[in-house]
Image (spheres, coloured by chain):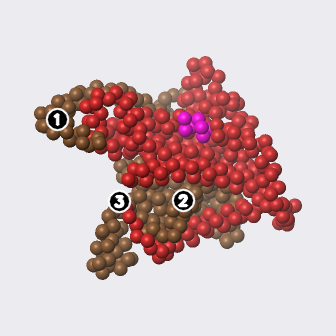
Chain colours: A brown, B red
Amino acid sequence: MANTTISDAGGGEPRKMTIERPRKVARRIRPSGSMVVMALYLIFLMLPIYWLLNMSLKTNAEILGTFSFWPRDFTLANYTKILTDPSWYMGYVNSLIYVVLNTAISLAVALPAAYAFSRYSFMGDKHLFFWLLTNRMAPPAVFALPFFQLYSSIGLFDTHIAVALAHCLFNVPLAVWILEGFMRGVPKEIDETAYIDGYSFPRFFIKIFTPLIASGIGVAAFFCFMFSWVELLLSRTLTSVDAKPIAATMTRTVGAAGVDWGVLAAAGMLTIVPGALVIYFVRNYIAKGFALGRV
Amino acid sequence: MNKTVNQKAWFLILPVLVLVAFSAVIPLMTVVNYSVQDTFGNNQFFWAGLDWFDDMLHSERMWNALGRQLMFSGIILAIQIPLGIFVALNMPKKGFWSSFCLVVMSLPLLIPWNVVGTIWQIFGRVDIGLLGYTLDAIGIDYNYTQNTLAAWITVIVMDVWHWTSLVALLAFAGLRSIPDAYYQAAKIDQASRWAVFRFIELPKIAGVLMIAILLRFMDSFMIYTEPFVVTGGGPGNATTFLSIDLVKMALGQFDLGPAAAFSLMYFLTIMAISWVFYTVMTTIDKREGK
């Protein structure tokens, strides 16, 4: 109904102009209010992060002694300490290893499954889809102890693969959902044409289909990466020394001499870096990813 | 899209099934196992039937935690959903500033959860944190480790800081998918700003909004790390939410039976509520598909 109104109204060229004009004026006036709102909101978001950055560039004496909005006694010692001490930087390495492992496993199993969900209907598909989602809803606190026992009993405790597998609990369903959303956008005729041309399923999937949903794979990878990176409860429960994630290493700053605030802040800043680096590439898809591919 | 019926598609699902069964079903069965047994130590277990469930249903501790949890999730949703929509309506539509806003807004979502906790723990401290120091300087008695109200406000503001952007991003994506024609029609009808929002924008983003509510409800209902780092569940038990209480019970006191019974009921509650959301969501999907 709305469409017919428009085509009627915008039929003549001059009339369209009169419609356009007030809209442009309105646009010029309105942003001032919007800009204030956005500026306030972005400041609200940035202030705590700024404060962390500010602290990470100060010495402990300055943090505790004087209160200032920028470092008077600028120092990179906190960062140097983290990047030169193996017990610190190995935390980052461990985190990155299990995050990458998890992303690879999640995508590898989710791709065929998402294809099946987007193309075929079969017995129990809707229930299965919901069951997958329930795993995304499972509170990690419920699974912490059973996971600990399961991985201890099969000798995987304190390994990277254990954490990677544990994170599959919520990342595989997420990857399936996101990929399915993207795959639905690819017309089915492409598959059929390829089969008529004599492509086998694996060859079609790798040669033709995968490039078509490359952006979807990128987004799914990003989300797996992100949720594995931010999770702490499971990764802390499943590791002790060899695969200890950086997030758990951070509790080390509480020593006999009190908390080492500067190093804690620097470590926190460094955990923000990987996310900040990759987010630029997926900025236009991030909402689609969060909406599980359904915008 | 009309789908072909093909039972062989099950083979494509198989890897997911095996993996998820390994990492979800086996641990869940362990929990079920514990929930119906009691132990005197030494790995000797005996059948306890549904005693633990009965215990937990009459345990004041669990009901209190549930009450706090519901209150927390309720407040979070009541603040974040309207605020997120409001922010989305005010975002620049395209160009450099739009990308800039998207990137900055996504930043809090990508910070590890315990670092989020750490950031706010520092930020709220009266001696070295900007927020605590400022509040103290203007004469407000603020101490999130001692004062229940201050602890609650800190945890809620932290969650608003952390997750409002998610709602805003989703609402923004929904708003952008509305064809320009709708706005032009509204212009011709001389619809007010409110009417445009109420009759065009809100119905059009309803689907995405459901996802936002579902995600925010789920995640706030199982929140653990952030309040644990900031307040440790205190002062007293004031910010001990369900997950915090559960971890305390299972890993702290090692009360496996009650903790397992508690886990199952917790999981089932989340599933039941999420199922309602999911059904509403798919119904909206179908209606739009027609």
Res. A90 in view: no
> Counting residues from the N terminus, which is met first, the one under dot 2 or under dot 1?
1
Mark-to-mark CA distance, 2 and 3: 21 Å
Residue B75: say if magenta.
Answer: yes
> Counting residues from the N terminus, which is met first, the one under dot 3 or under dot 1?
1
The secondary structure type at the circle numbered 3 is loop
Q: Amino acid at mark 1?
A: Lys
Specify the subunit that label 3 lies on. A
x, y percent for residue A109: 49, 69
B128 and B193: which is toward the camera: B193
Label pair 2/1, CB-CB below 8 angstroms: no
Crowding at dot 1, Cα within 10 Å, few <14 / some 14-19 / many 20+, comes out as: few
Q: Residue at x 69, y 39 (%)?
A: B67
Decide: is A238 above or below B114: below
x, y percent for residue B281: 49, 50
Crowding at dot 3, Cα within 10 Å, few <14 / some 14-19 / many 20+, comes out as: few
Question: What residue is pinned by disc 2?
Answer: A130
Specify the subunit that label 2 lies on. A
Mark-to-mark CA distance, 2 and 1: 48 Å
- Left or right placement of residue A221 versus residue B153 in this view: left
Respond whether the residues carrying marks 3 and 1 are from the same subunit: yes
Q: Residue at x 61, y 18 (%)?
A: B139
Specify the subunit that label 1 lies on. A
Question: What residue is pinned by disc 1?
Answer: A16
Residue segment shown in magenta: B72-78
- Left or right placement of residue B244 versus residue B257 in this view: left
